[in-house]
Amino acid sequence: MTNAQVKSHTVHVDVLMDVMRILFNNEIFFTVEGINEEENTLLVKTSTNAKLTRHKKALENIKTLVSDFGYYRHGSDSGNNVGIDLDDEEE
């Protein structure tokens, strides 16, 4: 995939199905890199085409979804890494 953009997202299981729906509906390739049973989160790695607007919008939707959930669950953004992109690299 040219113009590939790879990002990792920490996703809580309570919003996992919503995130999966976004990924499948927008045909975004993803892998699960890890599971944290204590925090009930998954580390999901996505690979998108940086030139496709729908991929950009889908990633923004995912970031907003997990960020809003983190705020709802913890009451603030401080000390909470849910929804933060852990890496941002181009292949």
Image (tube, helix red, strand yellow):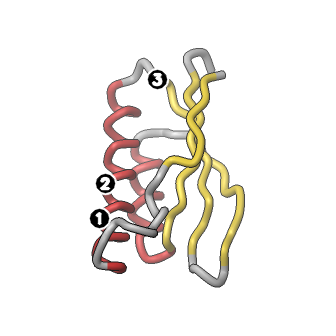
Q: Residues within 10 Å of mark 2 (few under 14, many from 20)?
A: some
Which sits in the foreground, 37 or 25? 37
CB within 8 Å, label 2 to label 1 = yes
Real-space CA distance between mark 2 and mark 1, rounded to the nearest whole angstrom? 6 Å
Query: Which residue is depicted at the point 34% across and 66% down?
Result: 77
Numbered label attached to residue 68: 1
Q: Which amino acid, mark 2?
A: Thr
Of badges 2 and 3, nearer the viewer stands 2
Position of 50 with respect to 73 (left or right) is right
The tag earlier along the polypeptide, 1 or 3, is 3
Q: Which amino acid, mark 1?
A: Asp
Q: Residue furthest front?
A: 78
- Image coordinates for residue 10, horizontal then vertical, percent: 54, 60
Residue designated by label 3? 50
Residue designated by label 2? 64
The image quadrant that residue 46 belongs to is top right
